[in-house]
């Protein structure tokens, strides 16, 4: 198993750092899957996470100037690592004005991702700051736990409102209630609702638009579904707030798929990164 | 969104209807008196007064004149209710506390009377939020009886200067002593802490002093 990569372009580096920061806000520990063309950050749904799961993938070619990997075996040319994204995020904080960042998988005393940040210096020799981030190697027999989740058989798919507004509203609602109801219909309307003994608050968004999904088996909401009828799910408000708070840059496309009373599937797309987040409905 | 004061079908008419173009004017004022969770709202034709009390020894009042509002209608002589101020503030600031230049949150508040919740309708950028906050029995409020003929000394200061002074007070002192006198030091804040005593003096001709009326020396702790 080998992995080494290098980023030289400052814009790519900052973009990569922002993505890691977002991941760090969503998961304490996650799985990093490396293939020769892509990187994946995966959080599999477990009771410990509150049932949420995350899938984020990016093309290595858009970020790295050099990228070489050798998987566990020729037929399985992939590496699965368990890591704490916050550690990677902190290491990259020192790289804000770096000349280059090299990442390498090492195994001196234990498996680590070695992040070497080359910083500009006044003297002729560069300063290099090295971070060793401990990682766990995930054996091949467990790889099935981390398969890409399929798009659920949703009832309604709708574009999200301006994230800044949604973020403010959800943050305030978080002070008032532990759970929030998201409901939406095929007429581009979405409501966020909370209700407690003290107060009930409903925010109405209109004209959001519904994404046209290509007709695949079971992937399109049933034709003939009443356009006004709302699909709804009650979810943990903290999980939603974490997802929204982690977005440092406005995505190119942001939408959610609602399976009534079961799960809400969020998809946030930037030019070169796709982030999917699943929040199950509360009982 | 019901924009008129007409009651919803089957309901009682509203006894209080208030409209404000920029809800932030109301929320910033209420935040200034938000040191307890609950507040009593008192509306008359003159305006809206929000009172917050602590342990029957401190009372803060925020009063907004009826003229400040774009619409202010009170159907009875006075309307009073107790409400959770933290919840009210969260609702008033539902679209966030910092606004983009050029955008503001429009507010409409409606109350049907005793036993009914307070309804808030807030709108910003085409997005509408409807809040329903339960109200409670109004409490007995302290009446400090600040009859104007009994006033001995009165000072109006710019708050920024006072805020800086309060931030620097020696917290190891048990009391804050306030002295007002017609001669030096005019207005003095004193503390007596572990390190010694400290005095902050404001001369009567200071830039911060808007009004200084002193008939006799008074010291209070």
Image (cartoon, coloured by chain):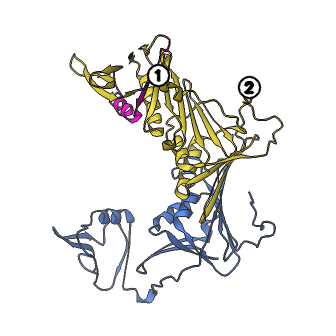
Q: What kind of element bears circle 2?
A: loop
Q: Is residue A84 magenta?
A: yes
Residue sitting at 32 percent across and 62 percent down?
A: B164
Q: Chain of mark 1?
A: A
Residue sitting at 79 percent across and 45 percent down?
A: A228
In the rendered structure, the answer to whether residue B30 lies left or right of residue B172 reads right
Q: Which residue is mark 1?
A: A140
Q: Which residue is mark 2?
A: A214
> Color of chain B here?
blue
Residue A101, picture quadrant: top left
Residue sitting at 59 percent across and 47 percent down?
A: B102
In the rendered structure, the answer to whether residue B91 lies left or right of residue A60 reads right
Q: Is residue A214 magenta?
A: no
Q: What kind of element bears circle 1?
A: helix
Judging by colour alone, the chain drawn in yellow in this rendered image is A
Q: Nearer the viewer, residue B66 or A237?
A: A237
Q: Position of residue B97 (x, y in %)?
A: 51, 53
Q: Nearer the viewer, residue A6 or B209?
A: A6
- Mark 1 Cα shell of 10 Å, populated few (<14), some (14-19), many (≥20): few
Could one spot residue B61 in this view of the protein? yes
Q: Position of residue B173 (x, y in %)?
A: 23, 72
Could one spot residue A101 in this view of the protein? no
In the rendered structure, the answer to whether residue A86 lies left or right of residue A38 reads left
* Residue that sits furthest to the front in the current view: A141
Residue A185, picture quadrant: top right
Q: Nearer the viewer, residue B164 or B86?
A: B86
Q: Nearer the viewer, mark 2 or mark 1?
A: 1
The stretch in magenta equals: A75-104
Q: Position of residue A62 (x, y in %)?
A: 49, 18
As displayed, is residue B24 above or below residue B125?
Answer: below
Q: Where does the N terminus of chain A fall, quadrant-wise?
A: top left
* Residue that sits furthest to the bottom in the current view: B150
């Amino acid at each position: 198993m080998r992995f080494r990569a290098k980023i030289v372009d400052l814009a790519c580096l900052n973009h990569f750092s922002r993505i890691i920061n977002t991941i760090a806000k969503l998961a304490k520990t996650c799985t990093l899957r490396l293939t020769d063309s892509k990187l994946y950050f995966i959080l599999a749904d477990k009771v410990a996470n509150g049932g949420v799961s995350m899938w984020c993938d990016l093309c290595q070619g858009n970020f790295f100037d050099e990228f070489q990997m050798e998987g566990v075996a020729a037929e399985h040319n992939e590496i699965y690592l368990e890591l704490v994204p916050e550690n990677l995020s902190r290491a990259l904080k020192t790289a804000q004005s770096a000349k280059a960042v090299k990442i390498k998988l090492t195994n001196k005393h234990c498996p680590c991702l070695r992040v070497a940040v080359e910083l500009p210096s006044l003297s002729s020799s560069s300063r290099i700051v090295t971070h060793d981030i401990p990682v766990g190697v995930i054996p091949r027999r467990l790889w099935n736990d981390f398969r890409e989740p399929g798009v659920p058989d949703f009832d309604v798919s709708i574009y999200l409102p301006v994230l800044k507004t949604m973020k403010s509203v959800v943050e305030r609602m978080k002070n008032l209630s532990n759970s929030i109801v998201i409901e939406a219909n095929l007429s581009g309307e979405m409501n966020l609702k909370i209700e407690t003994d003290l107060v009930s608050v409903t925010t109405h968004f209109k004209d959001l638009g519904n994404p046209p999904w290509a007709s695949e088996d079971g992937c399109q909401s049933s034709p003939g579904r009443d356009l006004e009828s709302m699909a709804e799910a009650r979810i943990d408000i903290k999980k939603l707030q974490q997802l929204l708070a982690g977005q440092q840059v406005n995505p190119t496309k942001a939408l959610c798929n609602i399976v009534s009373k079961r799960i809400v599937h969020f998809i946030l797309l930037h030019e070169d990164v796709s982030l999917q987040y699943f929040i199950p409905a509360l009982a | 969104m019901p924009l008129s004061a007409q009651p919803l079908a089957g309901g009682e008419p509203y006894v209080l209807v208030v409209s404000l173009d920029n809800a932030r004017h109301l929320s910033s004022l209420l935040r200034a008196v938000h040191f307890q969770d609950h507040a009593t709202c008192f509306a008359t034709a003159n305006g809206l007064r929000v009172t917050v009390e602590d342990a029957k020894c401190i009372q803060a009042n925020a009063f907004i004149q009826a003229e400040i509002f774009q619409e202010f209608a009170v159907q009875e002589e006075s309307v009073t209710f107790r409400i959770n101020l933290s919840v009210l503030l969260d609702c008033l600031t539902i679209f966030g506390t910092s606004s983009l230049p050029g955008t503001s949150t429009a507010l409409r508040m409606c109350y049907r009377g005793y036993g009914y919740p307070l309804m808030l309708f807030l709108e910003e950028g085409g997005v509408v939020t409807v809040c329903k906050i339960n109200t409670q029995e109004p409490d007995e409020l302290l009446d400090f009886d600040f009859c104007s003929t009994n006033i001995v000394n009165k000072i109006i200061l710019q708050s920024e200067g006072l805020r800086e002074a309060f931030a620097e007070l020696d917290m190891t002192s048990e009391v804050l002593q306030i002295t007002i006198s017609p001669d030096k030091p005019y207005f003095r804040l004193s503390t007596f802490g572990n390190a010694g005593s400290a005095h902050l003096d404001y001369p009567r001709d200071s830039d911060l002093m808007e009004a200084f009326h002193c008939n006799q020396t008074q010291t209070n702790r």
